[in-house]
Image (cartoon, helix red, strand yellow):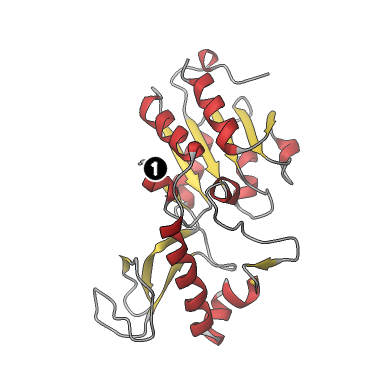
Amino acid sequence: MGYDPVKFSAPAIVILTGAGISAESGLATFRDSGGLWEKHRVEDVATPEAFGRNPELVQRFYNKRRRRLGEVSPNAAHRALVELENRWPGPLLLITQNVDDLHARAGSQNIVPMHGELLKARCLACGAVSTWEEDILPASHCRRCGQPGQLRPHIVWFGEMPLELDRIYTALEGCSLFIAIGTSGTVYPAAGFVEAVPRQAHTLEINLEISDVGSCFKERRQGAATERVPELVGELLK
């Protein structure tokens, strides 16, 4: 049975998106079937320890991913979520596990990029986070403190705490509808968000295949996000 907004007063929506929605714009998903991330072991490019061992490799990896963003565009699913945000009469929060800028480029405003952002750099010397669209090089200077060689990608790596968790859980605990789109259900804490919403809330998963936590959702819709998300938004906005 689908979600009926008439059943809820002042309904609040929380949406979680994962790699699947970006994949339909042409970005590689997190890991392939062999456990590699764009031909690299995750342990070699996505942990603080990896950055400590070989910062040049890690920077090259993220520089390549940052440049790749200029070759892709938001898709119909991104645009449909913007329409929902603009027209929904209640509160709506979009949480994304993705580090690309496709939601923002599509026009979404109320976004929590819980795993960081490719187009930002963080200074290890002063902690400043700056917009950064070019490569991060060994000689790159922090734009606040001026220190060279202290920048890292503003990415949450394995072993690090996701961003804005207090805001996320506050929204989850107050929502009437939770939607997960293109998520694998394998990466925590995001995989556990479905269990943090109120018992009476409706929960819906949109995915090509049922995720590892798919059984926790009250409703599951299989198919491409570019098809299923616009359909759902059309239903909600009727």
Task: Determine which residue is flagged by label 1.
Answer: 106
Q: Position of residue 199 (x, y in %)?
A: 64, 29
The answer to whether one can see residue 176 in this image is: no
Q: Is residue 147 left or right of residue 91?
A: left
Amino acid identity at mark 1:
Ala
Q: Report the residue at 57% width, 71% height from top.
A: 46
Which residue is at the front of the view, 181 or 189?
181
Does residue 125 lie above or below 214 as drawn? below
Q: Position of residue 91 (x, y in %)?
A: 41, 30
Q: Report the residue at 52% width, 48% height from top.
A: 25
Q: Is residue 130 left or right of residue 29?
A: left
Which residue is at the front of the view, 186 or 227?
227
Does residue 58 lie above or below 176 as drawn? below
The answer to whether one can see residue 188 in this image is: yes
Residues packed near mark 1 inside 10 Å, few (<14), some (14 to 19) or many (20 plus): some
Q: Position of residue 14 (x, y in %)?
A: 50, 36
Q: Position of residue 166 (x, y in %)?
A: 46, 49
Q: How many marks?
A: 1
Name the quarter where the N terminus is drawn: top right
Q: Report the residue at 63% width, 54% height from top.
A: 188
